[in-house]
């Protein structure tokens, strides 16, 4: 099913070069704990971009940038007017981020382009690498800002006006980045693309636990976020009988317990997390008058998400006791299903390369989410150590990274023949 | 049962003067929200002491101070060598404290001494007012520092070395206070005292709710504090199945729910409070790896406290799931029973003055706790608005404050005759 030609491209992947480049990129914004701090459009992010563009220019690839700072690196095809096969991810990190999240998808795409050159493979379609701006959203909200703006899901004007905690706008930070890392070509949003593929570490424990090398990503879970604010009344812990208390924490705990019961599915497919709790005044001898807790709920099936979320407010009201409660939805992101043909191609490539694999749904969101409605899109996952991500100790093996890049090379070569 | 002589002392209480002095004291360290900020041994605390001593000296009362800064104001008796009747409370406040907590017990005792003078009543025993240093414990830990040091429950040396958040020691702060508010006489710890009485706002809702003016305080609840630390593992909220999570918050919530079930007594006499919760990393999309919560448990009966506390660690272990848990006791304060004769005297005084009353156990701790083992001791409570205390909006009525001072006057006059 996969051409010998495409498998030759896969075998040309230089795993050692790919690993070395991760190490070089990690030096920029290196943290004491062995991770990286290259927040979006910071001087470190600009230095990371410049390092990448140095490698690209050494190969003679053309580089360009769009109005939100997404970078493109182009390996030409033999059919000058053909829409490119696009692949990439992001170089920005969390404040205490790892060496692989995002970086891998960028460096794997570059490695594919170089492997094609090294093995003298000419393809009809151009192959383009993309570096999406501000995927992490830790400096400027929201996450996946660059791909969302590219796709038209966020208006450019409001994105450019978004400010960081220090009051600097995205527009200002883009201007600073342009000085530090000049790019000659300019690009518009939503240009024609034949297919989009993104390689990424899993950011979860499944592949490692099941000893699979390749995750064939069928889609991205839907995500719903809620803030639940419970309001009671402060009271002295020593003097106030239970019957006279309006204990916001007691009510919040009853709500979370009931929501856990609702979401404890036998299949263990519902992801329900209360990750943040703020208690006021948070003093051992004062009955709390206000508790805020967050709900992060994910599932692959929009109908399941709708059924659960329709129960959140009623359950919170039912368990509020003498307190008041307000439930606010803060994120509603529908599930994404990737193109069936692309998903099949990734699976076939893993098979042909004799790599263990399994279908998997992405629990985290990715830039690919905004490409899926525009172009035939897909993702390739590789394992990461203990599923740990957004952490300085994030880790992956050179072998797994090379295997993922080989699958990416086979898929890109296959698609670029079409 | 109460002498006419003692009732005459009670009737000499000037409620208007008592109320006015609360307003004058509240001006020192006044907060925007209508409360007071006079933390222990601060310049404001020194100014509050100086205001009090001004009133005392105007009456010709002798003033003295002990090594931890407890202040004494003496109205002489006709029997020069008789042990005094001691009464007082504290002038220091929480950072955003109220106008009555502690202040009332000090000003009520002064009012009694002045009322005795005004009505020309001579008593065999001296009457002494005490201002205990640092009852609140908000600047220097622990609470009731002055009375504990006086009673020998805390060693003076370690108390003097205790530092505030800015690194200033109690010894330094006492020296500063001595410059700002000089006191001529010196006093030793644990001098002979005939009886100790402390008037205080209830700091709870019971008297107001039951429309009683006087709380006849039979004792102080026992208090146990625990820190419960639950340790799990961080994980990505989107990618980690429930079966692979070590969710410290989920475990903590199960523990608190089980502890609530243990302490939900029909009589509503157990005071169980979880007032503080710290969640790490406290991010909506990260499974928490560490939760610390506090337990504040109070009851009048040491046997009940022992029975409950023996179950805390087993219950936490039982509900820890895949996490680890460590339970640490941080406070173990036994219940205090006041002297039965003093309690009876307070009840009889309220009866004779035709004031509505009920027996009550103090939920909060007080300096009287450290007097009870040394001297026959008791307390008199008056209602406070909605039970609110340790708050700028703490409130009480002039009528209730005057009524409490009248009961105090009758009891002091009665005891000073003995």
Image (cartoon, coloured by chain):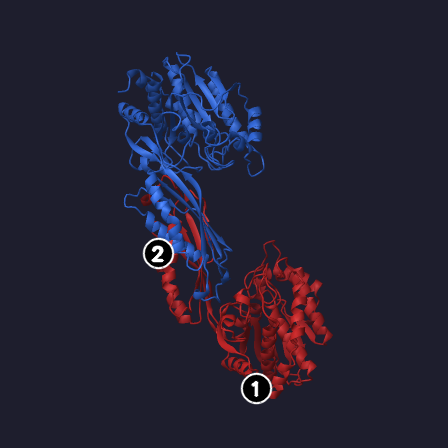
Chain colours: A blue, B red
Q: Quadrant of residue B178?
A: bottom right
Write down the chain letter for disc 1. B
- Asked if labels 1 and 2 share a chain, the reply is yes
- Compared to residue A4, the image places residue B51 above or below, namely below
Q: Quadrant of the C terminus of chain A?
A: top left
Find numbered disc 1 in the image and state the secondary structure of the residue it sits on: loop
Q: Quadrant of residue B114?
A: bottom right
Say whether residue B251 is visible: no
Disc on res. B317: 2
Quick one: B70 or B295, which is closer to the camera? B295
Q: Quadrant of the N terminus of chain A?
A: top left
- Compared to residue B82, the image places residue B44 above or below, namely above
Quick one: B233 or B16, which is closer to the camera? B16
- Crowd rating for badge 2 (residues with CA inside 10 Å; few <14, some 14–19, many 20+): some
Find numbered disc 2 in the image and state the secondary structure of the residue it sits on: helix
Q: CA distance from mark 1 to mark 2?
A: 56 Å
Where is residue A93 drawn, in percent x and y?
A: 47, 33
What residue lies at 46% left-to-right and 65% top-to-bottom?
A244
Left or right, B126 with respect to A250, comes to: right
Where is residue B215 drawn, in percent x and y?
A: 52, 75
Disc 1: which residue: B2
Left or right, A47 with respect to A217, comes to: right
Disc on res. B137: none
């Amino acid at each position: 099913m996969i051409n010998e030609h495409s498998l030759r491209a896969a075998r040309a992947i230089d795993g050692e070069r790919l690993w070395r480049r991760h190490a070089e990129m990690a030096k920029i914004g290196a943290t004491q704990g062995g991770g990286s701090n290259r927040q979006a459009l910071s001087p470190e992010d600009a230095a990371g971009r410049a390092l990448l563009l140095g490698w690209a220019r050494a190969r003679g690839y053309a580089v360009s940038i769009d109005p939100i700072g997404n970078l493109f690196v182009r390996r030409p095809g033999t059919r000058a007017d053909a829409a490119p096969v696009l692949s990439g991810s992001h170089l920005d990190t969390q404040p205490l981020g790892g060496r692989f999240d995002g970086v891998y998808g960028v460096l794997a795409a570059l490695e594919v382009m170089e492997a094609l050159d090294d093995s003298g493979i000419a393809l009809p379609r151009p192959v383009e690498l993309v570096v999406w701006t501000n995927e992490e959203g830790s400096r400027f909200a929201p996450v996946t800002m660059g791909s969302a703006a590219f796709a038209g899901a966020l208006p450019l004007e409001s994105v450019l006006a978004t400010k960081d905690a220090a009051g600097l706008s995205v527009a200002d930070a883009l201007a600073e980045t342009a000085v530090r890392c000049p790019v000659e070509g300019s690009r518009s949003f939503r240009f024609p693309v034949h297919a989009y593929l993104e390689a990424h570490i899993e950011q979860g424990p499944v592949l490692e636990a099941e000893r699979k090398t390749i995750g064939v990503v069928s889609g991205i879970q839907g995500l719903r976020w809620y803030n639940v604010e419970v309001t009671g009344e402060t009271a002295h812990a020593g003097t106030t009988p239970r019957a006279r208390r309006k204990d916001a924490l007691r009510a919040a705990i009853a709500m979370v317990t009931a929501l856990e019961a609702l979401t404890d599915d036998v299949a263990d497919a519902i992801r329900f997390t209360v990750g943040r709790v703020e208690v006021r005044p948070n003093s051992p001898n004062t009955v709390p008058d206000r508790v805020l807790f967050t709900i992060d709920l994910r599932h692959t099936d929009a109908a399941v998400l709708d059924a659960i979320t329709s129960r959140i407010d009623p359950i919170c009201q039912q368990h509020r006791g003498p307190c008041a409660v307000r439930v606010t939805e803060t994120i509603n992101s529908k599930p994404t299903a990737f193109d069936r043909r692309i998903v099949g191609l990734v699976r076939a490539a893993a098979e042909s390369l004799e790599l263990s694999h399994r279908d998997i749904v992405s629990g985290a969101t990715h830039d690919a989410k905004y490409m899926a409605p525009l172009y035939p899109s897909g993702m390739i996952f590789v394992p990461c150590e203990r599923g740990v991500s957004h952490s300085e100790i994030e880790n992956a093996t050179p072998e797994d990274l090379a295997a993922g890049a080989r699958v990416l090379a086979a898929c890109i070569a296959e698609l670029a023949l079409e």
